[in-house]
Image (tube, rainbow, N blue to C red):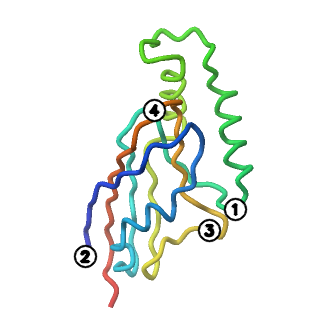
Amino acid sequence: MLWFQKTLTLPARKRGFHLVTDQVLSQLEEVSKAEIGFLQLFLQHTSASLTLNENADPDVRRDMELAMNHLCPENLAYSHTCEGPDDMPAHVKSSLLGPQLLLPIRAGCLALGTWQGIYLCEHRDQATSRRMVATLWGQPRS
């Protein structure tokens, strides 16, 4: 059985949905050592999230931001406002999308669909770098 855990750091990004599949995999050469298994990605933040979606057309990422802003507008009468008008909506968006992904590994690669990619969903206007715990478990390659 193969077990591995590592904390990754993604640089600060502007608010929006960012395709980070290649950046994540470049920090995890251990994926190539698993014949079959899982990679769990867990984002250690409450104002950003992870999701899996369209990896080809950047319009999808812009439209995801548009839809989330419609669902969680900044002009609601939030009580938690001490960190600025984008903070509480960021918490709601993070709860809706979630902080983690569980991805299958097959033959040393993520077994994603043709058009799927990992998104870092940044919900704050002035974000910082983001930490992600990557946990891999599975059967080693022969």
Determine whether label 1 and label 4 are within 8 Å by CB.
no
Is the residue marked by circle 3 packed among few (<14), some (14-19), or many (20+) residues within 10 Å?
A: few
> For this rendering, which residue is in front, 48 or 42?
48
Gap between marks 2 and 3 measured at Cα: 26 Å
Counting residues from the start of the chain, the first of labels 3 and 4 encountered is 4
> For this rendering, which residue is in front, 128 or 142?
128
Q: Secondary structure at mark 1?
A: loop
Tell me the residue that label 4 is attached to: 47
Gap between marks 1 and 4 measured at Cα: 25 Å
Counting residues from the start of the chain, the first of labels 1 and 4 encountered is 4
Q: What's the residue type where badge 4 is placed?
A: Ser
- Picture coordinates of residue 8 (x, y %)? 34, 55
Counting residues from the start of the chain, the first of labels 2 and 4 encountered is 2
Tell me the residue that label 3 is attached to: 113
- Picture coordinates of residue 78 (x, y %)? 53, 11
Is the residue marked by circle 4 packed among few (<14), some (14-19), or many (20+) residues within 10 Å?
A: many
